[in-house]
Amino acid sequence: MTITTYNPMASSRWGNHYAYTTVQESPPPESLPTETLELIFDLAVAESRRDLDPNHAPLVLRKVSRRWRAIADGRRSLWSHLTIQPSQFHQANAAVASQWLKRAGATTMLQITLIAHGVNKRHVRRVLDAILHTCVQWECLYLDLPASSAQHVLNHPAVSFPALKQLRLEIDGHVVLKPHAPLLDAVRLLIRPPTWQPMTIMNLGWHSITYLDIDIASGTLDYIWHVMYLCPHLDTLRVTAFINCMLPQRPVLLHHHIYSNIRKLRLVCDLRPSVIAHFLYGLTLPRLNYLELICFDESAESFEWPMKAITDLRQRCLPPLVSLITVGKLISEADIMALVRNLKYLEEIAVVHENQNLVTDAVRALLPRDNAALEKQHAAYYQERAVAGLP
């Protein structure tokens, strides 16, 4: 669109010949091509919480004009994510949420976020009942709900989750969960006090889970052993445990060592180093290649026990451990060098205490520095496994 404007300053200074200027302005939004509007809509929802606030995208896009509403309603990807905040759980929004998911279509995979702490249970139920019929399309689900509401979603007799792959669950209190989710692969659990129950009660289809992130605030590390026992295909385990410092008691029904094929283990805790060591002594991890221990314990115990436990783990099951990170405890250069030598095949190590990396040049000199050194180290590792009769 071309617009000609009159500039009085230019007229007085340069004469009327320069008084009029021509500028090229963008066309009004209503005249933009449909493809351009669709791109604008996609960018708008990418920066939005996608909740039921009528002033947030995508709902706000429907208020501009009939054309915008038609384009937004016909673009299923705009409606594939739905977040319901605590203030949005009321009767009027039951229909809004239902229509939202209807616009996504019957075949679109959905990401659902439900946050409802401090909300009247009756209001929560009304909104949940309006959207549960779409549960067969839910691929990712984040629930931050009271235990009773979580059970209403996950234990509903008419509800199943055949497409659910990712579950993030934040609950408090005792809850028995039995969702039917055969494809569940990644789980994030935040269990608040006052209670914590054995993982067997939470029937989440543990056998299919490969990624598990658990944040617990009560109990002991016994429960993590339970998790590893229940998840034979677990690849990555992340644990945040600000709990008591009792030594975990190995479950009677489990083996002397809990066997797991996990490759990545991250433990963030306020436990004494001796407790961490006891936990590691109870594990057999033949595929472990990444270990991160972040300890905020303020006791006078040194990191000697976990160092011995890590070395013991390496000698017992010969894992391909190539990356080790420890945070929170002071370790001398001599001890770090001894640990690197004992682990033999490390490729990277970080030891952090009070925001300072304690890994010195002398320690780095023990690590492989180029591809040739890495290949030589890999060959030595596989040779050691072959001698031990391991694949």
Image (cartoon, rainbow, N blue to C red):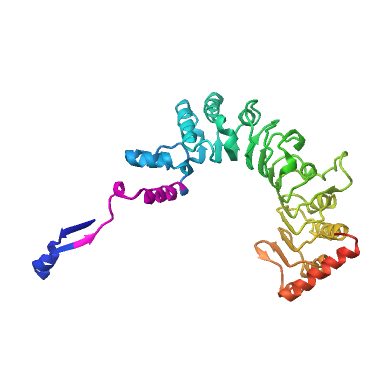
Q: Position of residue 160 (x, y in %)?
A: 64, 32
In the displayed structure, does residue 155 sit left or right of residue 74?
Answer: right
Q: Is residue 254 above or below residue 352?
A: above
Residue 37 is covered by the magenta coloring:
yes
In the displayed structure, does residue 82 sit left or right of residue 161?
Answer: left
Could one spot residue 389 in this view of the protein?
yes
Q: Is residue 386 above or below residue 365?
A: above
Residue closest to the eye, 71 or 301: 71
| Residue visible at 11% across and 69% down in the picture | 13
Per the rendered image, the range of residues in magenta is 22-45
Residue closest to the eye, 75 or 341: 75
Q: Position of residue 291 (x, y in %)?
A: 74, 57
| Residue visible at 16% across and 59% down in the picture | 5
Q: Residue 229's quadrant in the figure?
A: top right
Q: Residue 334's quadrant in the figure?
A: bottom right
Residue closest to the eye, 96 or 269: 96
**Prevailing secondary structure of the magenta residues:** helix
Quadrant holding the C terminus: bottom right
Residue closest to the eye, 13 or 363: 13
